[in-house]
Amino acid sequence: MKFFVDTAEVSEIRALAELGMVDGVTTNPSLIAKSGRNMAEVIAEICAITPGHVSAEVTATDHETMLAEGRFLRGIAPNVAVKVPLTEAGLRTCRALTDEGTPVNVTLCFSPTQALLAAKAGATYISPFVGRLDDLAQDGMQLIADIVQIY
């Protein structure tokens, strides 16, 4: 089992890493924006704390710009995994980056079918939105069970 913390709070990540509780980190632009710091600097700092993958998310919505952002993010540190949305453009970007050897985390997954598409596109990781489904009175953990069964 691997434990990935979902935050951009460097002090929290450092504390958990010192306990041996962090195998990787997932983050997103809104979490980093709350710090008021430069995104690339925060990602580099997080990458230096943990040898595991650090998911850094693109902000673009079209394939070409996502691809350029993904390549930039991957250049920050060797343990960056590029996070893309589960959209048609995101899946195209996932395939292109995966073909280049970049690990990719596909986010905004709300169904088992979407998780299957992400896997087919070469995703290294899938980020199901369990909490958001629970907020909509749906069983978010059932989504996890369904994805596990499919994979």
Image: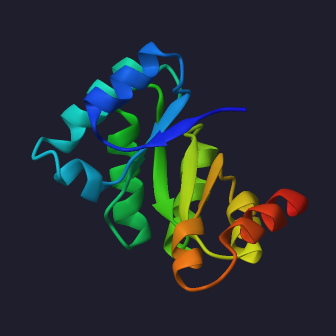
Total numbered badges shown on the rendered structure:
0
Q: In the shown orientation, is residue 41 left or right of residue 24?
A: left
Indicate whether 7 appears above or below 148.
above
* Residue in front for this viewpoint, 61 or 29: 29
Quadrant occupied by the N terminus: top right
Q: Is residue 92 visible?
A: yes
Indicate whether 87 appears above or below 103.
below
Q: In the shown orientation, is residue 9 left or right of residue 126?
A: left
Colour option used: rainbow
Q: In the shown orientation, is residue 27 left or right of residue 89?
A: left
Whole-percent x, y for residue 75 in the image: 36, 33
Q: In the shown orientation, is residue 25 left or right of residue 148?
A: left
Whole-percent x, y for residue 13 in the image: 37, 29
Whole-percent x, y for residue 82 in the image: 46, 47
Residue at 18% across / 53% down in the picture? Answer: 33
Q: Is residue 129 visible?
A: no
Query: On the image, which quarter does residue 113 sit in?
Result: bottom right
| Residue that lies at the very extreme toward the left in this rendered image | 36
Residue at 63% across / 46% down in the picture? Answer: 99
Residue at 60% across / 34% down in the picture? Answer: 3
Residue at 53% across / 68% down in the picture? Answer: 131
| Residue that lies at the very extreme toward the bottom in this rendered image | 136
| Residue that lies at the very extreme toward the right in this rendered image | 149
Whole-percent x, y for residue 5 in the image: 48, 39
Quadrant occupied by the C terminus: bottom right
* Residue in front for this viewpoint, 70 or 45: 45
